[in-house]
Amino acid sequence: MGTAAQFLPLVLLVVLMYFLLIRPQKKREKQTTMMRNNVKVGDEVVTIGGIRGKIVKTKDDTLVIEVGADKIKFEIMRWAVSKVEGEPTSNKKILEEDDDEEEVAPKKIMPKRMKKSAAPAKKSTEEEIEQVEAEIVEDPLEENDK
């Protein structure tokens, strides 16, 4: 009994590590391999190097993507795909089935439109000058010095 009691904390630690580290990592790996295998022509992808492109041709282990305004085409390995931007709904449904939690997109706040109102009539420059002169307050000390 004494030796079994000594190994119990070690066994509990291994089980805890499995549920906290190994299981979530395998789940992420499964999702990424499924995403990489389900890419098709027309999807927009981002590579692990940060290059954005549109898939033009798919092969077994490679993809041909089109990049930039000049539409340069080059071939990448399928494992180099980091993220699919133009992901079809069927792939999203498959990935969402594996997720236990649902994510809700935050509501976008749009500014209110301002109503057009009649613009106030502009004062002539003479009226503006008179108004500024009326607002200027003379310093009482200056009057005593004169």
Image (cartoon, rainbow, N blue to C red):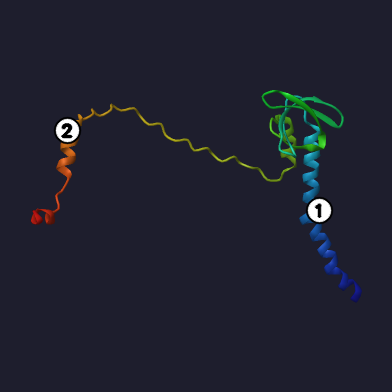
Residue pictured at 37% horizontal, 31% vertical: 114
Task: Please state the horizontal and vertical placement of residue 84, each as a whole percent of the image.
Answer: 72, 34
Q: Work out whether residue 34 or residue 102 is closer to the camera in this orientation and state it.
A: 34
From the image, tell me which residue sits under label 1: 22
Residue pictured at 25% horizontal, 29% vertical: 120
Q: Amino acid at mark 2?
A: Glu
Among numbered discs 2 and 1, the one appearing first in the sequence: 1
Residue 134 versus residue 17 in the image, above or below: above
From the image, tell me which residue sits under label 2: 127
Which numbered disc, 2 or 1, marks the residue closer to the eye? 2
Most distant residue in the bottom direction: 2
Task: Please state the horizontal and vertical placement of residue 112, each as a whole percent of the image.
Answer: 42, 34
Residue 71 versus residue 13 in the image, above or below: above
Determine which quarter of the picture holds residue 47.
Answer: top right
Few, some or many residues within 10 Å of mark 2 (<14, 14–19, 20+): few
CA gap between label 2 and label 1 equals 79 Å
Residue 26 versus residue 66 in the image, above or below: below
